[in-house]
Amino acid sequence: MFENNAICNMLKIKYPIFQGGMAWIGTAELASAVSNAGGLGLIGAGHMPPDVLKAEIQKCKKWTDKPFGVNIMLMSPFVKEVMQLMVDERVPVVTTGAGNPGEYLPALKEVGSKVIPVVASVALARRLAKGGVDAIIAEGCESGGHIGEISTMPLIPQVVDAVDIPVIAAGGFADSRGLAAAFALDASAIQMGTRFVLSKECIAQENYKNFVLKAKDRSTVVTGRSLGHPVRVLANKFTRTFHEMEAAGASPEELEKFGAGTLHLATHKGDVDNGSVMIGQISGMLDDIKPVKEIVDDIINGLPDAVAELQKKYF
Ligand code: TUI
């Protein structure tokens, strides 16, 4: 079906579906399941120390013989050691988030890793494409977690026009209609985080998943704008207090301190009142927890109909 798809051919994967590399919950369990289902699974390195990440990579290698990747959060205090680990482990695909991975490119390319940064703007996409990255993930601000300022619909075609390498669309995708829309915007693949949070294989604590299941279209808010790193999360007691502190003129240090550790509190302790429940806006549409294979198969199997429906209606 995807013989002519640039990303499937480049990465030797069956389907043009990436899993977003989510901190704390993008574990080897989830990444190997997505890779085994024919997509590209990604271990979310977040703030993981290198030894913990190494163990996660080894689990992933044991559980799948398909290509997988690691997503590296460039604001991690361990970023230098973690990049060295990518080189040592010859990880097939390295995606990056929350910054510019330029300085690490030569070493990764040297060992043949495909480097695919996540960007939220045309300017950075253009600069990185010139620097020799293999593809670009363009992520709209509908996404969960750390985001940029532009939404998916205007971002994707502008990035596609600015670079001559494949573009993966991220932010707001969860079904066959979304995949068809991404193809219509000339993206080669989609990346999904939120949809895979609501999978059987995702290890997020059940309160986290149940809170996401209840989300409606307007349930997410953005914290951290005044700090220069906006983060999309579900509105709760934590976000209300955060915004009150911001309005009362709290210092960046106070706000950083208040936010520290809150993602883990939500994902692992299940405290969805005081934790950061990072999730994308498409959560409003999702009302089930499915096995990863079913999520992927449903999107792929629904694609011909999604496209045929357009053909039938308008041509
Ligand atoms: O990285 C993400 N999403 C994330 S990372 C994360 S971990 C975290 N934990 C606690 C607090 C905050 C974050 C949770 N979600 N997505 C990729 C992404 N990258 N979105 C936006 C960007 C981005 C933003 C600015 C990329 C580059 C950039 O500018 C760099 C430059 O030099 O211009």
Image: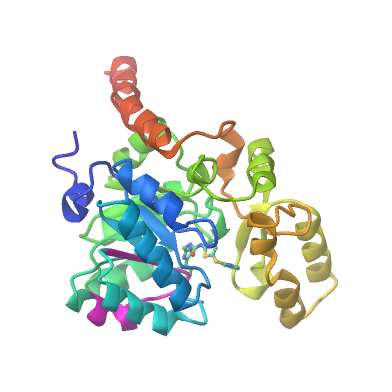
Q: Is residue 287 above or below residue 84?
A: above
Q: Is residue 43 above or below residue 12?
A: below
Query: Where is residue 136 shown, x and y percent of the image?
Result: 31, 61
Query: Magenta span has 58?
Result: no
Residue farthest toward the top in the current orientation of the protein? 312
Query: Where is residue 52 shown, x and y percent of the image?
Result: 47, 72
How does the figure colour the protein chain or chains?
Answer: rainbow
Note whether residue 118 is visible. no
Foreground residue among 45 and 184: 45
- Please report the residue visible at 45 percent of the width from the left and 42 percent of the height from the top: 173
Left or right of 287 in this view: 191: left
Foreground residue among 273 and 307: 273
Q: Is residue 183 above or below residue 171?
A: above
Note whether residue 257 is visible. yes
- Please report the residue visible at 51 percent of the width from the left and 72 percent of the height from the top: 48
Query: Where is residue 204 shown, x and y percent of the image?
Result: 59, 50
Query: Where is residue 122 shown, x and y percent of the image?
Result: 37, 64
Query: Magenta span has 105?
Result: yes
- Please report the residue visible at 82 percent of the width from the left and 69 percent of the height from the top: 245
Left or right of 19 in this view: 194: right
Magenta part of the protein: which range? 93-108
Q: Hey, which quadrant is residue 243 in on the image? A: bottom right
- Please report the residue visible at 40 percent of the width from the left and 76 percent of the height from the top: 100
Foreground residue among 285 and 18: 18
